Amino acid sequence: MVGIKDVAKAAGVSVSTVSNVLNGKSNVGEDTKVRVLNICRELSYYPNSAGKALKAGKTNTILFNFSDFDRSFFLKIIHGISDYVNDNGYDLIICTEKSCEKFMRSNLSCGGIILDQKMKDETLNKIAGNSYPIVVLDRIIENPYIKSIVVNNYDPMCELIQGVIKRGYRHFGFVGGPEHTDDNKERYRAFRDVLEQNNITFQQKSYFAGDYREKSGYTAAKILMLSQELPDCLVCANDNMAIGAMKAFRDNGIRVPEDIAITGFDNCDLAEVMGLTTVSIPNYERGYIAARYLIENIRGSRNVEPFKISAKILWRNSVLLKKK
């Protein structure tokens, strides 16, 4: 592999002279500069920008942190982040929770977008600063160097449940995600509030704790089928669990929506194929907005007011137009 010493030897100059040429210094004669650049081209030598960044203590690299490879919506978020980052002359690295902290230093990345809930608030509060702004998704952290971007889960979930009730459904089950997450708390609170407003009783035995993965939805549906009476409608806190429940019912001869209606939340790629009624979150735009705010803060804007993203309902075949 060709290095700067090889270029210096071929040009008959010192390493420092080659360095001065590559860094655009004015203390090198024109003939020497042309000779050095020609030799760089001949030897296919290109300066290592990452190494220069390490020396200078700064970089133009954005970090994105996530961990759940089972959920396809992450790819749409990454796509949005990548498009904005590339359009603005930055690079992007993607890290998982275990390796993330060591890359969250200003000489390796200049700011981070955090989606992994395993990255604790205390850790992010320690890392965030004037030289390292952070954007977090799906939670709110009050810090002068952290921008929070969250989905408005409450309003569309209220609208969804009210719409299901208007279609004649009265008996509900609920499959929740990880109970410590803000999005699950908000979706479940909306569900309970609308039932209460409509004088519909919900029994806690009809709540099933999941983990946002398809398998937990499948398991919840299997447990539900052990009871003597199915609910009219099973509300799931995300699409993956709803799809798992749909598969479990199908495997056991229970029809959706004739025997039981199902709703999800997210609008993952498979939701349309499965005919799942759900709430659509604009995930590409979510990533794009996160990258925009992060780069603006890197450039000195200091905008840390929480930003809420709206979502909309998509009515599909997993809920009857009017329950008989």
Image: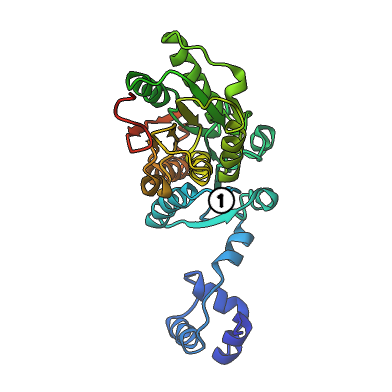
Please tell me which residue lies in front, 204 or 147: 204
Outermost residue on the left side: it is: 321
Q: Residue at x 61, y 76 (%)?
A: 16
Please state which amino acid type lies under the numbered disc 1.
Asp
- Residue 299: percent from left, percent from top: 46, 44
Q: How many marks?
A: 1
Please tell me which residue lies in front, 312 or 210: 210
- Residue 22: percent from left, percent from top: 50, 73
Which quadrant, please, contains the C terminus? top left
Q: Residue at x 61, y 84 (%)?
A: 1
Please tell me which residue lies in front, 224 or 92: 224
Local secondary structure at mark 1:
loop
Q: Residue at x 47, y 32 (%)?
A: 150
- Residue 38: percent from left, percent from top: 45, 87
Please tell me which residue lies in front, 200 or 303: 200
Q: Residue at x 48, y 29 (%)?
A: 235
Give the colouring mode of the picture: rainbow
16, above or below 252, in the image? below
Q: Quadrant of residue 307?
A: top left
123, above or below 98, in the image? above
Q: Is residue 18 visible?
A: yes
Tell me the crowding category of disc 1: few under 14, some 14 to 19, or many 20 or more residues within 10 angstroms, Cα based: few
- Residue 274: percent from left, percent from top: 40, 46
Q: Is residue 129 visible?
A: no
Residue marked by disc 1: 70
- Taking the image as shown, residue 270 lies to the left or right of residue 104, namely left
